[in-house]
Every structure is written in structure tokens, then in C-alpha cells.
Image (cartoon, rainbow, N blue to C red):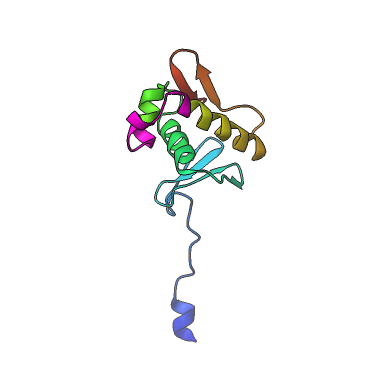
Amino acid sequence: MRARLRRPAPVPSTDAEQGWQRHGAFAIDRDGRRIHYGDAALDLTRYEYALLAALLQRPGAILSRAQLMDRGWDSSADSADRTVDTHIKTLRAKLRAAGAAHDPIRTHCGLGYALEQ
């Protein structure tokens, strides 16, 4: 009993200690390939995860479709540029379903996409 009393109480771990990184309303666990928006876990495909992870890596920076494909696709030669647009569309729908009041992914016509900071 005394030994048990001498043991330090477990300290609750923070998000960062568990591998989670916060970016505004987003929390990303790169090791577990999970992303939360607010309190909601996003159920993402591998391509949606890759796109959102790339945008979260550089918030505010405009990433072209080619840059996004390089980060998310094994071979971008097999896919069209519009593939990124389709995945961004479904990603936006999932963010709305998770409670996003506004669209955090901004389209820059002719340039690409950026995550608002």
C-alpha cells in the first residue's frame, strides 16, 4: 500500500504528446493518419486525407493541383487535374457535415487551393 502511495499520479497527456498537432479548428495525427475538425473526427479517404494534410502543412500557402497531386497520389500521370477538384468538393462537404460554419479551403482561380488561417 505504501509503495502505491509513493508512485506519482499519472499525468494526463496533452494532444502534442499523443502525436496530435493543432491548426486552428483542425487537429491532425500524422502517425495515425487522422484529422479532427472541432470535436468531430473526419472520415476521410486516403486522397482526402492527403489533400487536407498537405494544406494543413502550409496554412495560407496556395498549392497548385500539381503540387497537391504530388503529395497525395502515387502516380499523378494516371489522374486528371480535375481529380483534385472532385476530392476537394467531397472534402468540403465532410467539413460542412462536421460543423464548419464557413469553408476553410479557399479556391484561387487558376492557381490552386489554400487553407485559410
Please give the range of residues in magenta.
70-83
Q: Residue furthest bottom?
A: 1
Residue 80 counted in the magenta span:
yes
Q: Position of residue 107 (x, y in %)?
A: 52, 19
Residue farthest to the top, as pictured: 110
**14 versus 2 height, above or below:** above
* Horizontal and vertical percent position of residue 24: 53, 35
In the rendered image, is residue 68 in sight?
A: yes
User: Which residue is located at x 60 percent, y 38 percent?
Assistant: 94
- Residue at the far front in the pictured view: 78
Residue 63 can be seen in this image: no
Q: Is residue 8 above or below residue 27?
A: below
Q: Is residue 71 magenta?
A: yes
Q: Quadrant of residue 55?
A: top left
Which residue is at 57% across, 34% downward?
90
Residue at 50 percent of width and 60 percent of height: 12
Q: Is residue 49 left or right of residue 39?
A: left
Residue name at image x 47 percent, y 81 percent? 4
Number of labelled discs? 0
Residue 59 or 41: which is nearer the viewer?
A: 41
User: x, y percentage for residue 57?
Assistant: 40, 34
| Picture coordinates of residue 10, whole percent (x, y) | 48, 67
Q: Eyeballing the image, is 8 above or below 68?
A: below
Q: Residue 21: which quarter of the image? A: top left
